[in-house]
Amino acid sequence: MSNTKGSSENEDFHRYFKDKLEHWEDEPPVDGWKSIENVLDKKQANLTKWYTAAAVLLLLVPALYFLFTSQTSSQKEVATELSGSSTGGNITMLQTEDANSASCTEKPQTNCDQGFSNEQQSLAATEYAHNTSDQTNTEKFNPSTQKALTTDIAESGALAQSSNDNNKFNTELSSKKSPNGDEGSIIQSGAMRSEVYTHESNANSTSFKTFTSETKANNANEQNYDEADVSAKADITNDRDRLSLYLEDTPTNQLHENTENVSKDRKKRSEKVNSNSQEIRTFTDRSNMAQSLTPDLYDDANGSDAENKKKFTEKADDEVLPEDSLTVLKSSNAVKPDRDKNSSKTGRKKPKDEALDSVSITDPQKKLLTKKEGKADRPRDNKKRNSSSKWHFQPEVGTFYTFKKVNPAKDMIYITGFENENELSFKNAGYQISLKLRREVLKNTTITTGITWQMINEYSNYNFYNIIADSVEVTQVQDDSFDVIAYSNEANNEVHNTLQYAGLSLGIIQRVKFLRRKYNLTAGVSLLKSMSHSYSENEYRHTFNAKSTLISVRGGLEKTVPLTPYWSVTVTPYVEQTFSSIYTNSTYRLSPLKIGLDIGLLIPTGRK
Amino acid sequence: MEEDLIIGCKKQDRKAQEALYHKYSGRVMGVCKRYANTMDDANDIFQEAFINIFNSLKKSRTVKIESLEAWVTRISANVAVNYYHKNKKYLNHVPAESALHKIDEEEYGHILGRLRGQELLQLIGGLPTGCKHVFNLYAIEGYSHKEIAEIMDISEGTSKSQLSRARDIIKSKLKLLDHVKYKRVV
């Protein structure tokens, strides 16, 4: 009983409070709404930041991916080309002491990234080992007389003496020389040098070249091409020389002394040349080339040797190298030894370009030298690579203007006209972002596919009245007839709606030639789905509901402008027609006709 | 009208949000003051309650709420409880006198006009935080002990004991205020 009474008392106690306080209201803070609004705005701003960051990330990640994919694949292509020995690169060959059995190995390029990124001058370096064999000669081997020749082809063609290190190195090489001298190899070395410099000169390369001629006795320094050839000829009967080219930048002031010494020895050598029964090979343009490369040295050395040179050149023209003499040539082309095997065996004259491009021989110590393709060659290769890429990634941004075709809708509103019918407004401008993949399927035909996001802005200012009359005036004209006059109040409404769509696009690009210019005609279809929409507060609260799915077709004209050897910019003006209305169950139906301009970036993926 | 407000708030229309604020701000503030220990806490709870209301409306799939006022009150009460629970302010209990004194200073004119209601609020405000919340939830919001236990993450027994303790404190306060007897309202 007491519990029941207590419980009842408690309930009364609670009810007393509840009745008084359940609907209790108090004064809110004066700036309550402002603080809440600030918090809401801040949240919205944070949300916008996240959306922006996500969009940027979405664009960056695939762009970077394709960028690096493209770069890697281009490096692979370069490596492939190197193996083909046609464009130069980093090739290392191993030459045995016996020139007849010269073999080569190719080492992969290890600094390809750096070489391609920093736009350095390409270097071509070829090393010849020119050892002399002491079979019949009366001259003694003298390592101290070894000299190196350094030539800066691009700048002056001056020859330079190699450093002491190179001399020492060649001394070591000489000590390892084969006991079996190979006649003819020297001639080839001379010819090879000519070939190398011809090649470098044609390529406008700024390569630094140094070659050292190890000879015996007084053949220390034949430092221009004629001298090199003549000395080589002289060594045919006696010596097996090893010519070496090193990457070296050495002063050239000692070369003049060398050339004087060589001139003095030239008579002796030329006699040996004349007595040489070996078939030799040279190039007819050797003298001119050498002169152009090293004019000063050429003049110095040429005066005393003109006669011999003439004889030698005449004899050497149109000659075929004997089997032995092609050994080094074989080595020089030994990047693909199988291909060169026949020519070296048969003594067939090697194609000049092929021989020039691939000359690169290392010493037995496998010294690694670099040979990079010339700067002038690179854009051509890049263009080739670019054009050969069938897959392209294309991020695209654009803006468009929406023209409206308004149809009456089933509503209780009659629109009498649009106030902004003939005026252009930025409120009707929309934006578009696309990420596309393109693939060339035929020679002039490319298909594209991708994802598209677009924001359609629609601004309308229209006059209307309600179908149901505001008032009706009925007048009796006669006994059985009435005049009924309905009155409706015409009003003006202004709406600014924003609709966002995203979806898939599929298109085809056909390259056509018109008025001697090539254009890309584009056609495509898009399937878009409504993502979000916002409607402005209109006075009469007319309803606008976005249609969930849109299908539109577009046609345009694409112009590609090369931006870099890899990338191109595409500019595409287009017209796009949407099949259905973007509104459903709304005051009016609106089928947008968009005229826009897309600007894209064409990035080859590097896959052929 | 309420439906329009809800639709507007779902679209995050600022005007609709402002309209809803002006309509229920007094009601929410009344709830906040009942639960808060200080005016600062009441203002914080007030702001948090409205942010919570707008977020809930935005996420809500329906536009029909049986009683928007009751829904707003319920959310405000939950926010207030969570505010102290989250900030662990049960431990930093502010003496009731200071809070009441502050109210006295700021709203003296209102107290005169609403003497009885304000007196009751003072009495509730003088309760320890835990007791106050249980009393508010049980006696005014109409929650059961089970629901209170879930909301406040306490046991039902604790809820009952807190309620009993709250009643005792209020009665003792009423004696001090010379409201010795209370009548049963018929």
Image: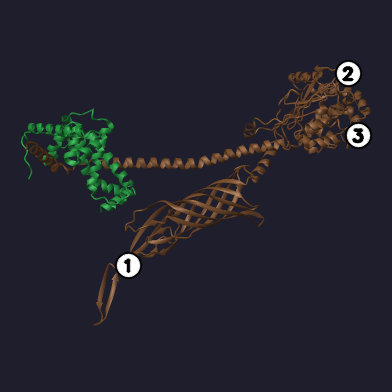
Above or below, comparing residue A441 to residue A29 in the picture: below
| Residue A167 shows up from this direction | yes
Residue at the spot of label 1: A467
Sort mark 1 into few (<14), some (14-19) or many (20+) by Cα contacts within 10 Å: few
Q: Secondary structure at mark 2?
A: loop
Callouts 1 and 3 on one subunit: yes
- The hue used for chain B is green
Image color mode: by chain
Chain letter belonging to callout 1: A
Q: Are discs 2 and 3 both within one chain?
A: yes
* Badge number at residue A59: none
Q: Which residue is mark 2?
A: A139
**Which quarter shows the C terminus of chain A?**
top right
Q: Residue furthest front?
A: A1
The N terminus of chain A - image quarter: top left
Instruction: Please tell me whether mark 3 sits on a helix, a strand or a loop.
Output: helix
The letter of the brown chain is A
Which mark is first along the chain, 1 or 2? 2
Viewer-proximal residue, A583 or A38?
A583
Residue B107 image offset from top left, x and y in percent: 16, 37
The mark nearer the N terminus, 1 or 3, is 3
Q: Position of residue A414 (x, y in %)?
A: 36, 66
Task: Identify the residue under disc 3.
Answer: A315
Q: Residue B41 placed where, x, y %?
A: 24, 34
Q: Of label 2 and label 3, which has the lower sequence position?
A: 2
- Image marks 2 and 1: residues in contact by CB distance under 8 Å: no
Asked if residue A376 shows in the view, the reply is no
Left or right of A432, for residue B106: left
Circles 2 and 3: CB distance less than 8 Å?
no
Residue under the point 26% across and 38% down? B79
